[in-house]
Image (spheres, rainbow, N blue to C red):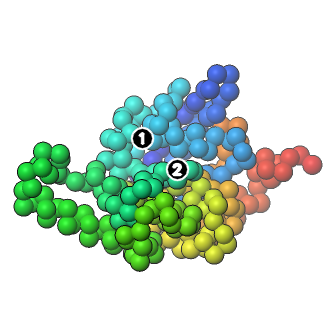
Amino acid sequence: MNPVLKTEGLTKHFGGVKALDQLDLTVRQGAIQSIIGPNGAGKTTLFNVISNVIPPTVGEVFFNGENITRMQTHTIAAMGLTRTFQNLRLFSEMTVLENVMVGMHLRSKGGFFTSALKLPWVFREEQRIRGESREWLRFVGLHDHTDQIAGSLPFGNQKSLELARALASKPKLLMLDEPAAGLNMRETQDMVQLISQIRDLDITVLLVEHDMDLVMEVSDHVVVLDQGRKIAEGDPETVRKDEVVLKAYLGEE
């Protein structure tokens, strides 16, 4: 089976620091794959380069066999590669429903002028977007908060809302940057279930996460980075016992 995502020799320099160093990564379709590593390992930099938030110094990124290294971020998203961020990026003054509807703009055919003309098909499309957005809110458990202002939600619910908005763009690959950060134990377990349910929708998941319990419970495959290099990969149990991985996290002693 062809990989949904592949990087070749991916390198990113920040001055004299190599945040990524000749990284080759493969993500197979339908998997939940985690990227782990100590602080400063290059995990978020990897996400930023893949989604072209920042360009690589050297190397290439392929999505479904197509080179996306120098494509615009919105073009990459329209192709089906969507991500969330460590820090929430919601429209805090908009309603919960409106936030999810924004996530569907890439799939919308209407523009400013067609909307201004109030054509019948534009109205039908808006109704469709509104209905699908409600379904995504139901999927993440926020269907009772549709009309609430997003910024008034508890932090855990805001995390779920960001996830619903990302899903509304109908991704083929969803990249989650620390989805459990700031969540309590119950919320973290809910996130585990959500991630598994997302995979059941035939969406490949690539996640960066510090919560090792979540990683070991939900992942099919784990890649370990240290100082921008891949030092280990395999199934969760293999990675958990890897001496090189233990040294990277805990030190030599």
1 vs 2, front mark: 2
User: Residue at horizontal 62%, vertical 69%?
Assistant: 188
Above or below, comparing residue 191 to residue 92 in the picture: below
Above or below, comparing residue 45 to residue 92 in the picture: above
Could you tell me if residue 174 is visible in this image?
A: no
From the viewer's side, name the closer residue of 13 and 91.
91
Q: CA distance from mark 1 to mark 2?
A: 21 Å
Could you tell me if residue 18 is visible in this image?
A: yes
Split into 4 quadrants, where in the image is the N terminus?
bottom left
User: Residue at horizontal 63%, vertical 75%?
Assistant: 186
Q: Which residue is mark 2?
A: 85
Q: Position of residue 71 (x, y in %)?
A: 36, 34
Q: Total label count?
A: 2
From the viewer's side, name the closer residue of 126 and 241.
126
Q: Quadrant of residue 200?
A: bottom left
Q: Quadrant of residue 214?
A: bottom right
**Which of the marked residues, 1 or 2, is nearer the chain's N terminus?**
1
Q: Is residue 229 left or right of residue 93?
A: right
Q: Amino acid at mark 2?
A: Phe
From the viewer's side, name the closer residue of 58 and 102.
102
Q: Which residue is mark 1?
A: 62
Category of crowding for the residue at label 2, using alpha-carbon neighbours closer than 10 angstroms: few (below 14), some (14–19), many (at least 20): some
Category of crowding for the residue at label 1, using alpha-carbon neighbours closer than 10 angstroms: few (below 14), some (14–19), many (at least 20): some
Q: Amino acid at mark 1?
A: Phe
Q: Disc 1 on helix, strand or loop? A: strand
Q: Disc 2 on helix, strand or loop? A: loop
Q: Position of residue 195 (x, y in %)?
A: 51, 67
User: Residue at horizontal 20%, vertical 67%?
Assistant: 127
User: Residue at horizontal 64%, vertical 61%?
Assistant: 182
Q: Position of residue 25 (x, y in %)?
A: 54, 44
Residue farthest top in this picture: 15
